[in-house]
């Protein structure tokens, strides 16, 4: 019975220990899981309705709500930024890279709390959110890659190390005789501080005087109570997991060594005090007071030695945590993503075993993929799909070009017309927008962006220390400085050179200065101007001529550079002002005027202000939205690519053309039912959601043209088929 009781107690202790040790990980992993679930819920709501419908009911939901709400202005910022200006080639190193990792770091700095444990979960969630935007699963290595996650872990680790050092010091205090009890169950031995003094006295005196020992033994150190570190349950969990008994034992050994050294120094001080005439009792008590003060310092120094082993154990815990977070982030591969392998297997099987059905297999694949494209997937959200579709479009363009080279051999006029119409249509959807200048996507109508931190990020990219406008102005300023330097050098060096030459030859008499002119008075009869010295005179004049020509060339080059950089500034401002709200325009003008007035740019301030005024006359508009920037538009673009390949490379198969043309019509019609636009901005950034309002809609001309061309292709396919049947060909 006793054995069962002992086993039961051990089991309880093990379970308790396990539950206690998992407190920190349970907290972070639990919060992380809640972050992910809430994040995915909110994203699905935005995709369906354009907004978050749920009302946050706890801290995690509120944090995710706030962060996801910032995705819209972040996406809008990048949308405007990418269409406003381009960084000059070769100048990329002069500008800061703004990506979602940078933005996530900015978000973290604004929303982190005073709880280091919660901050680790928040930083971990941001890793998941950004990886989600990049369309990739989270791996363990993604967490240390993110600077903000490292910062959160560092802050937590610092607190754990400090708490471990304070806890070690509490055990020191208890071992030295302080009242109170340190938390935890670490083993320690009592330390008698007087033993260090007595040992030091014995090393200093052959026979320690009895009266000195009496004073030492009767002295009361009167230590303060044990001071346990202030820790919440999660920090204490990490401290007890990271601070092991070996580290405590090592710290105690270091403390004893330090106290021994302090005691030796205190005894030396005692001898000095005694030699100065102090009474024995006073000198010994002063020595002991000094030793007592040194104990506090030595406790702190010895306690800090546990930080290194604690840091190693802590980092191991974080590594395990990263693996658990990555495991929580895993999403099962959708069955629809395996279709590409099935396509490949089906085609290989048909080519090897049943070549007669290859055409039917390809038709089945095209039909199925078109239906998946229209109803099942967003081609912009899957890296695999977007890559394969991109390859498809490039291949289509190449094969269609080859087919057009042999268009003269085609006898069917309707087929020729189909090829030309679909080819033109393919180019139209590449270059013409699906949506043009939607009123409510203009910056001045987007108060959410104008009141967000992303306006500040954008402005910093424009006229901050490393902004594009600042870059253009600095280039102009550098050219102006060089122009001044060129003319100065000519005046200071070349003219001085010639006058010095005249003076050395004795030909220069004097230089007479008048209010508005100078008179160089030379001796006409000087031998310098004589026939025998014409060679030297000619050489001097050639030097002046060559230097003057070089100065003229340099000045012209600098002027051309000024004009180029002025044009670059004008181009930048024109691009920015095309989409800039009045608020942003005013901010740009104020900053630009400030930069002009505080530099040598004042010399051409009129020209620069005219450039600003010209840009300011541009009417604000919204960026156009291309077909490939929206899910439904990209689907139609891909279908048109399939239609193009069906009327060119596969033109002999009427069924391809007929089926794909019908699917293209279906995809085009679905655009009319689109209520919420998900606008692709840039790889790695969230899509910008815009709910279409009354009066906003797609480009009707292009959609009607797509439908009309598709109907013609379908008619041509049927006409060709019936014609072949009539001619007795199948």
Image (spheres, helix red, strand yellow):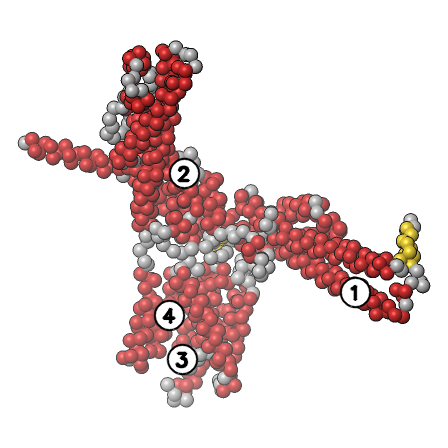
Q: Secondary structure at mark 1?
A: helix
Q: Secondary structure at mark 3?
A: loop
Residue under circle 2?
155
Mark 2 vs mark 1: in front: 1
Mark 4 vs mark 1: in front: 1
Q: What residue is drawn where x is 42% and y is 82%?
A: 652
- In percent of width and height, residue 365 lies at 35, 71
Q: Quadrant of residue 274?
A: top left
Q: Is residue 652 above or below residue 475?
A: below
Mark 1 vs mark 3: in front: 1
Asked if disc 2 and disc 1 are in contact, CB closer than 8 Å, the reply is no
- In percent of width and height, residue 513 lies at 90, 51
Q: What residue is drawn where x is 31% and y is 48%?
A: 323
In this view, the residue farthest toward the front is 206
User: Does 374 sit left or right of 524 as displayed?
Assistant: left
In this view, the residue farthest toward the bottom is 728
Residue 543 numbered tag? 1
Residue under circle 3?
653
Dot placed on the residue nearer the N-terminal end, 1 or 3: 1
Residue 586 in sight: no
Q: Quadrant of the N terminus?
A: top left
Q: Whole-Å distance between the Cαs marked 4 and 3? A: 14 Å
Q: What residue is drawn where x is 33% and y is 78%?
A: 358
- Neighbor class of circle 1 (other Cα within 10 Å; few <14, some 14-19, many 20+) is some
Dot placed on the residue nearer the N-terminal end, 4 or 1: 4
Q: Whole-Å distance between the Cαs marked 1 and 3? A: 80 Å
Residue under circle 4?
367
- In percent of width and height, residue 57 lies at 39, 37
């Amino acid at each position: 019975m006793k054995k069962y009781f002992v086993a039961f107690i051990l089991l309880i202790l093990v379970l308790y220990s396990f539950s206690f040790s998992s407190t920190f990980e349970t907290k972070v992993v639990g919060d992380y899981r809640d972050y992910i679930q809430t994040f995915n819920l909110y994203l699905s709501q935005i995709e369906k309705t354009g907004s978050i419908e749920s009302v946050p009911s706890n801290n995690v939901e509120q944090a995710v709500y706030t962060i996801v709400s910032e995705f819209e202005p972040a996406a809008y910022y990048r949308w405007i930024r990418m269409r406003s200006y381009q960084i000059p080639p070769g100048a990329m190193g002069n500008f800061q890279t703004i990506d979602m990792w940078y933005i996530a770091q900015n978000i973290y700095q604004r929303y982190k709390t005073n709880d280091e444990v919660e901050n680790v979960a928040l930083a971990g969630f941001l890793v998941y959110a950004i990886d989600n935007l990049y369309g990739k699963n989270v791996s363990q290595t993604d967490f240390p890659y993110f600077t903000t996650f490292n910062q959160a872990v560092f802050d937590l680790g610092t607190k754990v190390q400090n708490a471990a050092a304070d806890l070690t010091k509490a055990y020191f205090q208890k071992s030295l005789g302080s009242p109170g009890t340190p938390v935890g169950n670490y083993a320690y031995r009592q330390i008698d501080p007087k033993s260090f003094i007595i040992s030091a006295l014995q090393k200093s005196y052959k026979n320690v005087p009895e009266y000195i020992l009496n004073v030492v033994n009767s002295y009361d150190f009167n230590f303060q109570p044990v001071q346990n570190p202030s820790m919440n349950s999660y920090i204490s969990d990490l401290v007890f997991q990271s601070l092991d008994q070996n580290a405590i034992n090592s710290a105690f050994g270091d403390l004893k060594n330090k106290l021994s050294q302090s005691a030796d120094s205190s005894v030396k001080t005692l001898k000095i005090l005694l030699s100065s005439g102090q009474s024995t009792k006073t000198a010994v008590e002063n020595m002991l007071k000094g030793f007592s003060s040194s104990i506090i310092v030595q406790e702190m120094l010895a306690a800090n030695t546990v930080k290194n082993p604690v840091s190693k154990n802590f980092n191991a815990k974080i590594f395990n945590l990263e693996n658990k977070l990555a495991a929580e982030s895993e999403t099962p591969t959708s069955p629809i993503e395996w279709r590409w392998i099935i396509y490949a297997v089906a085609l290989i099987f048909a080519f090897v075993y049943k070549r007669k059905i290859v055409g039917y297999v390809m038709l089945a694949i095209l039909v199925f993929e078109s239906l998946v494209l229209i109803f099942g997937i967003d081609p912009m959200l899957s890296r695999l799909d977007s890559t394969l579709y991109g390859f498809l479009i490039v291949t289509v363009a190449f094969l269609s070009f080859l087919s057009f080279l042999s268009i003269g051999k085609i006898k069917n006029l309707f087929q020729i017309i189909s090829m030309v119409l679909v080819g033109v249509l393919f180019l139209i959807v590449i270059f013409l927008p699906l949506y043009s200048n939607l009123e409510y996507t203009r910056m001045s109508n987007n108060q959410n962006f104008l009141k967000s931190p992303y306006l500040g990020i954008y402005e910093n990219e424009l006229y901050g220390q490393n902004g594009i406008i600042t870059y253009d102005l600095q280039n102009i300023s550098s050219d102006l400085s060089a122009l001044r330097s060129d003319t100065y050098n000519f005046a200071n060096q070349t003219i001085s050179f010639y006058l010095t030459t005249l003076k050395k030859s004795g030909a220069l008499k004097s230089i007479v200065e008048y209010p508005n002119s100078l008179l160089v008075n030379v001796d006409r009869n000087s031998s310098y101007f004589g026939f025998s010295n014409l060679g030297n005179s000619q050489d001097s004049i050639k030097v002046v001529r060559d230097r003057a020509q070089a100065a003229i060339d340099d000045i012209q080059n600098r002027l051309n550079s000024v004009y180029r950089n002025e044009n670059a500034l004008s181009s930048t401002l024109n691009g920015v002002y095309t989409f800039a709200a009045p608020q942003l325009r005013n901010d740009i003008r104020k900053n630009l005027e400030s930069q002009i007035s505080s530099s040598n740019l004042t010399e051409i301030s009129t020209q620069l202000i005219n450039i600003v005024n010209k840009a300011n006359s541009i009417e604000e508009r919204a960026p156009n939205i291309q077909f490939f920037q929206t899910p439904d538009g990209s689907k139609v673009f891909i279908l048109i690519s399939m239609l193009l390949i069906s009327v060119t490379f596969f033109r002999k198969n009427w069924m391809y053309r007929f089926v794909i043309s019908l699917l293209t019509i279906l995809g085009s019609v679905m655009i009319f039912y689109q209520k919420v636009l998900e606008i692709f901005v840039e790889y790695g950034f969230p899509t910008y959601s815009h709910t279409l309002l009354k009066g906003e809609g797609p480009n009707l001309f292009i959609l009607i043209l797509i439908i009309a061309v598709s109907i013609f292709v379908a008619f041509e396919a049927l006409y060709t088929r019936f014609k072949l049947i009539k001619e007795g060909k199948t």
